[in-house]
Image: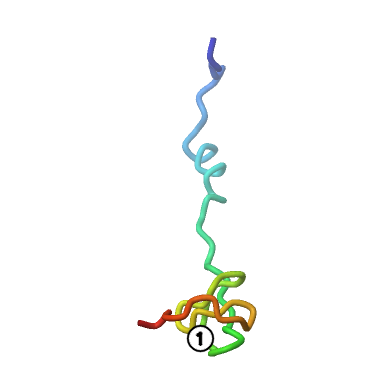
């Protein structure tokens, strides 16, 4: 058996539930080595470093 609603939900009530399903802007921080904007806790795409250590040798190529 499935759930069967007793009364019809209006469009406004239905859309109020969906109001919080919006995307958020990604949090960008400056890279500690090169200063480029990057997402936190990830390897920098421009210089290839993470936590001031070089992870990727040829990142900008």
Residue drawn 49% across and 76% down?
56
Residue drawn 61% across and 70% down?
41
Reply above or below: 22 against 43: above
Q: Nearer the viewer, residue 14 or 33?
A: 33
- Number of on-image labels: 1
- Give percent across and percent down for residue 29: 59, 79
Residue drawn 55% across and 44% down?
16
- Give percent across and percent down for residue 44: 51, 77
- Give percent across and percent down for residue 4: 53, 16
Within-10-Å neighbours for mark 1: few <14, some 14–19, many 20+: some
Residue named by callout 1: 36
Disc 1 secondary structure class: loop
Q: Judge from the rendering whether residue 39 lies leftward or rightward of residue 59; answer left or right.
A: right
Reply above or below: 44 against 32: above
Quarter occupied by residue 30? bottom right
Residue drawn 61% across and 81% down?
53
């Amino acid at each position: 058996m499935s759930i069967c609603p007793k009364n019809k939900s209006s469009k406004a009530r239905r859309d109020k539930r969906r109001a919080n399903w919006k995307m958020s802007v990604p949090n960008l921080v400056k890279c500690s080595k090169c200063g480029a904007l990057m997402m936190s806790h990830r390897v920098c795409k421009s210089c290839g470093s993470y936590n001031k250590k070089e992870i990727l040798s040829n990142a900008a190529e």
